[in-house]
Image (tube, grey):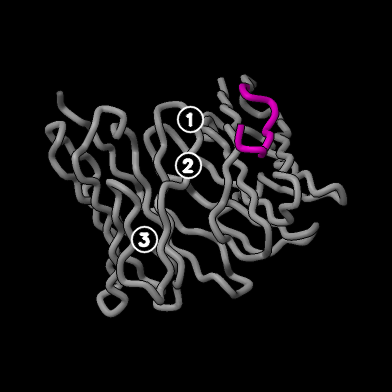
Amino acid sequence: DSGVTQTPKHLITATGQRVTLRCSPRSGDLSVYWYQQSLDQGLQFLIQYYNGEERAKGNILERFSAQQFPDLHSELNLSSLELGDSALYFCASSVGRESYGYTFGSGTRLTVV
Amino acid sequence: GENVEQHPSTLSVQEGDSAVIKCTYSDSASNYFPWYKQELGKRPQLIIDIRSNVGEKKDQRIAVTLNKTAKHFSLHITETQPEDSAVYFCAASRRGSSASKIIFGSGTRLSIRP
């Protein structure tokens, strides 16, 4: 167990729907990062939060949004889902603002049918 | 924008032989270079990292080298074993700035032949 908790582990939903993925960082970590990994693809950076504030943004679609709450857990909201959104979504956390050796969660596998 | 290129995309080596994976980065301000190993269906796990003030780092059978001038860095695995089979990702980041996200290479699928 890495200490980074992601729920749910698996999610199957229909096109056009909206889902929320949840991430609890390791105890003491203030930064949360979200990555998307499509089948046999690399890790695409989506967004970073540090202590509740957005710090960096990658190629995140406008249909996607995220936030980090006062208790430091983070949620990634995906709306108007398309078949191409099917992927593994990883959350990672680190202690500070700086990405010094992330710890990844086990991921949420999203399947859009 | 920042980019990390990784080669080869697939690599098959005989058990006991060495494996080398190479990466180049575009952001000259990058100063932290981690390597992650991802087994099938699992989360990426940090296996070794190197900072820009160091040219080489070794941990048992794994070593990383960094050439800042050429913006190249490499992972070397010696005496490969079946459990080394996985996808390996190189990455680069600009630690110490507000733009500190880690940018990953596209991955190398390493297969160890018995």
Residue identified by numbered label 2: B45
Residue type marked 1: Lys
Of tags 2 and 3, which is closer to the observer? 2
Question: Residue A11 or A96: which is nearer the viewer?
Answer: A96
Please, what secondary structure does the residue beneath circle 1 have? Answer: loop
- Residue drawn at x 53%, y 52% as measured from the top left: A45
Residue type marked 2: Gln
What range of the chain is rendered magenta?
A: A1-10
In-image side of B97 versus B26 (left or right): right
In-image side of A76 versus B22 (left or right): right
Please determine if labels 2 and 3 lie on a single subunit.
Answer: yes
Residue identified by numbered label 3: B4
Question: Residue A25 or A7: which is nearer the viewer?
Answer: A25
**Cβ atoms under marks 2 and 3 closer than 8 Å:** no
* Dominant secondary structure (helix, strand or loop) of the stretch shown in magenta: loop
Of tags 1 and 3, which is closer to the observer? 1
**Cβ atoms under marks 1 and 2 closer than 8 Å:** yes
Subunit of mark 3? B
Residue type marked 3: Val
Residue identified by numbered label 1: B42
Mark 1 neighbour density, 10 Å: few (under 14) some (14–19) many (20 or more)? few
Instruction: Examine the rendering and report whether any part of residue A7 can be seen.
Output: yes
Whether residue B61 appears in magenta in the rendering, the answer is no
Mark toward the start of the polypeptide (2 vs 3): 3
- List the single residue furthest toward the right: A70
Please, what secondary structure does the residue beneath circle 3 have? Answer: strand
- Residue drawn at x 24%, y 32% as measured from the top left: B81
How far is mark 1 from mark 2, CA to CA? 9 Å
Query: In which quadrant is the C terminus of chain A drawn?
Result: top right
| A71 versus B34 height, above or below | above
| B93 versus B12 height, above or below | below
- Residue drawn at x 66%, y 45% as measured from the top left: A63
